[in-house]
Image (spheres, helix red, strand yellow):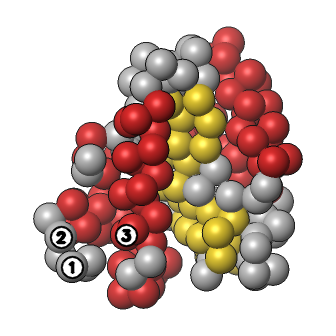
């Protein structure tokens, strides 16, 4: 599975201003709603589902990265967006560090395989220090999109 299969490039943000977990999640889901990927009347329900998932354990996986995610019945396809935080977000990360790269993922409950493949792709790419470094330096959403395309073409991880 490739990033281009599920990341909504028009919802990518390169300087998300939110500084805490709930507000950054809300902002990211709102960007998906603004571009028509999430129904407006489902926004709160999706935010709550992601926060409920966070209660099970932080999706701040360390090294400045978080992958908040949920399965939600209001979506009929895998959707995702990416945000970069210059200041960093307190995300209760496993290593205690602030998060600078966020990949938010929402999938239909009846497609658990797609959900797992997307999470696997995200985590595999985010283990690459060069990829993460370039993402953190991205100034425009198009820069992020180009890096995702390069990752899809195996230009970072062997």
> Which tag, 1 or 3, sits closer to the chain's start?
3
Do the CB atoms of the residues marked 2 and 3 lie less than 8 Å apart? Answer: no
Count neighbours of disc 2 (C-alpha within 10 A) and say few if under 14, some if 14 to 19, many if 20 or more.
Answer: few
Count neighbours of disc 3 (C-alpha within 10 A) and say few if under 14, some if 14 to 19, many if 20 or more.
Answer: some
CA gap, disc 1 and disc 3:
10 Å
Above or below 141: residue 55: above
Residue depicted at x 54% and y 22%: 109
Mark 2 or 1, closer to the camera: 1
Count neighbours of disc 1 (C-alpha within 10 A) and say few if under 14, some if 14 to 19, many if 20 or more.
Answer: few
Above or below 117: residue 61: below
Q: Name the residue under label 2.
A: 154
In this picture, residue 81 sits left or right of residue 130: right
Provide residue 56's location: percent of width, then percent of height: 81, 48
Mark 1 or 3, closer to the camera: 1
Element at badge 1?
Answer: loop
Element at badge 3?
Answer: helix
Provide residue 78's location: percent of width, then percent of height: 41, 32
Residue depicted at x 76% and y 59%: 58
Q: Mark 1 points at which residue?
A: 158
Element at badge 2?
Answer: loop
Do the CB atoms of the residues marked 2 and 1 lie less than 8 Å apart? Answer: yes
Question: Looking at the rendered structure, which numbered label has been put on residue 125?
Answer: 3
Residue depicted at x 60% and y 23%: 72
Q: Is residue 140 visible?
A: no
Q: Is residue 118 visible?
A: yes
In this picture, residue 46 sits left or right of residue 112: right
């Amino acid at each position: 599975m490739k990033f281009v299969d599920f990341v909504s490039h028009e919802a990518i943000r390169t300087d998300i201003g939110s500084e805490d977990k709930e507000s950054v999640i809300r902002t990211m889901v709102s960007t998906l709603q603004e571009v028509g990927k999430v129904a407006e009347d489902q926004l709160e329900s999706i935010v709550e589902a992601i926060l409920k998932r966070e209660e099970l354990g932080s999706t701040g996986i360390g090294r400045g990265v978080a992958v908040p995610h949920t399965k939600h019945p209001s979506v009929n396809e895998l959707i995702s967006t990416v945000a970069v935080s210059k200041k960093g977000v307190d995300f209760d990360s496993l290593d205690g560090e602030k998060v600078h790269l966020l990949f938010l993922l929402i999938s239909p409950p009846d497609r658990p395989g797609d959900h797992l493949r997307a999470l696997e792709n995200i985590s595999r790419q985010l283990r690459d220090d060069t990829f993460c470094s370039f993402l953190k330096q991205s100034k425009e959403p198009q820069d992020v999109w180009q890096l995702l395309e390069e990752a899809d073409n195996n230009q970072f991880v062997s």
